[in-house]
Image (cartoon, rainbow, N blue to C red):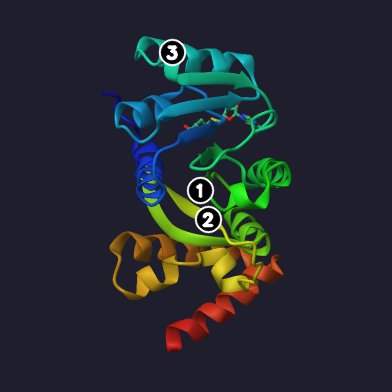
């Protein structure tokens, strides 16, 4: 059994929750690198089959080897491709994109949803863990009509990561600066006393306090946060 890092464990937890509401199906791990998440999904019965993609041959070979070593060669496919290009999504798929920059994630998901019929998209779940530009990722998903099923925070080697689990409704909406920057579901978790989210928000307050001098959206987010806290 693989020992995942705290960050990948938190991603894995969201994949498990996505599967619980979806029935059997595949996990598509985009940017799979070492293939650890894919192996864990098969080991734990969270995927019938896994598809790993990576834009580089080196990481794709690592995934292929990890799956072979774990005895899952016949239940996996590894492809060198950009995002999900060339992979047709089917009902029950869970698409995981973890450990990549937000702009890269937006680019990958834009093409992925453009290539997927709406009725199938509604039967697919996305688990996303951006390394940066998290606010842009949240804004993107809301504007493209995705609902946030869950949003969590974890720390790994003293760095905060946020993870989101999404499903497609096809009804776009606006989040506003506060929820783009602090999270869609995290503010309510903070209000209900979630200790890690509180720590995360204290960290964001510091970072955004500095960034607000040059970033209008962040400045607006801090104003909205004050209003939210007054309620
Ligand atoms: C930092 S690793 C993260 C690996 C793993 N997902 C994780 O969370 O631990 C990022 C991986 O994504 C791959 N990658 C970057 N851009 C990609 C893209 N557009 N399509 C597919 N893979 C990509 C990189 O080659 C690398 O192996």
Q: Which residue is mark 3?
A: 73
In the image, residue 91 above or below residue 220: above
Query: Few, some or many C-alpha atoms within 10 Å of disc 2 (few <14, some 14-19, many ≥20)?
Result: many
First reached walking from the N terminus: tag 2 or tag 1: 1
Mark 3 closeness class: few <14, some 14–19, many ≥20 residues within 10 Å = some
Residue contact between numbered discs 2 and 3, judged by CB atoms under 8 Å: no
Q: CA distance from mark 1 to mark 3?
A: 24 Å
Percent coordinates x, y for residue 54 in the rendering:
60, 25
Q: Residue at x 43, y 20 (%)?
A: 75
Q: Answer yes or no: disc 3 within 8 Å of ligand 1.
A: no
The residues tagged by marks 2 and 1 sit, at their Cα atoms, a distance apart of 5 Å
Residue 219: image quadrant is bottom right
Nearest to N terminus: mark 2 or mark 3 = 3
Category of crowding for the residue at label 1, using alpha-carbon neighbours closer than 10 angstroms: few (below 14), some (14–19), many (at least 20): many
Name the image quarter holding the C terminus.
bottom left
Residue in the picture at 36% in, 44% down = 10
- Does the CB distance between marks 2 and 1 fall below 8 Å? yes
Q: Which quadrant of the rendered structure holds the N terminus? A: top left
What element does badge 3 sit on? helix
Q: Which one is nearer the viewer's eye here, 92 or 84? A: 92
The answer to which image quadrant residue 222 occupies is bottom right
What residue sits right under mark 1 in the picture? 125
- Is 155 placed left or right of 121 in the picture? left
Give the labeled residue for mark 2. Answer: 167
Coordinates of residue 186 in the picture (x, y in percent): 43, 66
Decide if residue 35 is in sight here: yes
* Viewer can see residue 157: no
> Where is residue 164 drawn, in percent x and y?
48, 53
Task: Identify the secondary structure beneath mark 2.
Answer: strand
**Placement of 121 over or under 93, stated as above or below:** below
Give the x, y percent position of residue 178: 56, 72
């Amino acid at each position: 059994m693989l020992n995942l890092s705290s960050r990948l464990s938190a991603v894995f937890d969201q994949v498990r929750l996505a599967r619980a509401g979806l029935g059997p199906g595949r996990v598509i791990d985009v940017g799979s690198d070492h293939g650890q998440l894919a192996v864990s999904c098969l080991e734990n019965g969270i995927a019938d089959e896994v598809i790993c993609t990576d834009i580089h041959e080196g990481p794709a070979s690592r995934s292929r080897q990890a799956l072979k070593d774990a005895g899952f060669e016949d239940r996996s496919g590894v492809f060198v491709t950009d995002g999900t290009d060339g992979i047709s999504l089917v009902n029950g798929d869970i698409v995981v994109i973890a450990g990549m920059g937000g702009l890269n994630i937006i680019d990958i998901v834009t093409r992925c949803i453009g290539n997927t019929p709406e009725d199938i998209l509604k039967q697919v779940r996305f688990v996303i863990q951006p390394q940066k530009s998290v606010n842009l990722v949240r804004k993107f998903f809301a504007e493209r009509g995705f609902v946030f099923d869950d949003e969590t925070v974890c720390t790994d080697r003293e760095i905060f990561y946020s993870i989101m689990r999404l499903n497609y409704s096809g009804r776009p909406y606006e989040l506003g600066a506060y929820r783009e920057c602090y999270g869609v579901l995290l503010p309510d978790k903070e209000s209900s006393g979630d200790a890690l989210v509180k720590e995360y928000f204290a960290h964001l307050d510091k970072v955004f306090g500095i960034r607000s001098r040059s970033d209008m959206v962040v400045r607006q987010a801090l104003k909205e946060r004050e209003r939210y806290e007054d309620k």
